């Protein structure tokens, strides 16, 4: 795990079936948006998916396909606050 994870985030990862490796990829390749109060929302967008496919290969991308809708909220101190699966567009938040 690249970044420290809060107890809450660890529980959410377990409940939602999101492994450490998927969160690592999310932090490495995901796109960040401001989420208020100094937090950042990190998720995979089309550009980050293309970059992953190019760097990791299509076979690897297919293996992690079920986690491509994952997101993470990262605090000011770069601690992962929570993780989840997107159910709607972030622009609607």
Image (spheres, grey):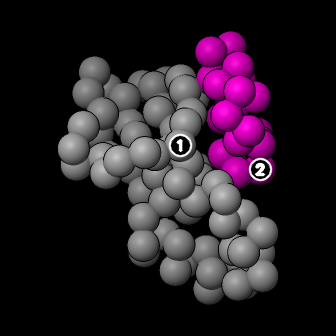
Of the 4 image quadrants, the one containing the C terminus is top left
How many angstroms separate mark 2 from mark 1 (CA)?
Answer: 15 Å
In the visual, does 4 lie left or right of 31?
Answer: right
Q: Secondary structure at mark 1?
A: strand
User: Relative to residue 62, is residue 37 drawn left or right?
Assistant: left
Label 2 Cα crowd, 10 Å radius (few <14 / some 14-19 / many 20+):
few
8, 31: nearer the viewer: 8
Vertical placement of 88 versus 30: above or below? above
Residue 33 shown left or right of residue 8 in the figure: left
Q: Residue lying farthest top?
A: 7
User: In front: 33, or 71?
Assistant: 71
Q: Which mark is residue 68?
A: none
> Residue 88 in the image: x percent, y percent?
35, 47
The residue sitting at 38% across, 37% down in the picture is 40
| Residue nearest the observer in this picture, 32 or 69 | 69
User: Where 53 sits versus 8, above or below?
Assistant: below
Q: Is residue 28 visible?
A: no
Q: Does the image show residue 74?
A: yes
* Residue interval drawn in magenta: 1-24
Residue 11 sits inside the magenta stretch: yes
Tell me the residue that label 2 is attached to: 21
| Image spot of residue 31 (x, y percent) | 42, 57
To which residue does mark 1 refer? 85
Residue 53: image x %, image y %? 62, 81
Q: Residue at x 66, y 66 (%)?
A: 65
Density class for disc 1 (Cα within 10 Å; few <14, some 14-19, many ≥20) is some
Q: What residue is rendered at 42% in x and 65% in y?
A: 45
Q: Is the Cβ of the residue at disc 2 closer than 8 Å to that at disc 1?
A: no
Question: Is 76 or 69 nearer to us in this picture?
Answer: 69
């Amino acid at each position: 795990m690249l970044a420290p994870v809060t107890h809450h985030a660890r529980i959410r990862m377990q409940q939602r079936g999101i492994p450490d490796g998927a969160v690592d990829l999310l932090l490495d390749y995901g796109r960040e948006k401001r989420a208020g109060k100094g937090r950042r929302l990190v998720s995979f967008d089309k550009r980050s998916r293309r970059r992953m496919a190019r760097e990791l290969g299509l076979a690897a991308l297919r293996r992690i396909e079920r986690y491509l809708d994952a997101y993470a909220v990262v605090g000011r101190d770069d601690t992962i606050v929570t993780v989840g699966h997107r159910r709607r567009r972030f622009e609607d938040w």
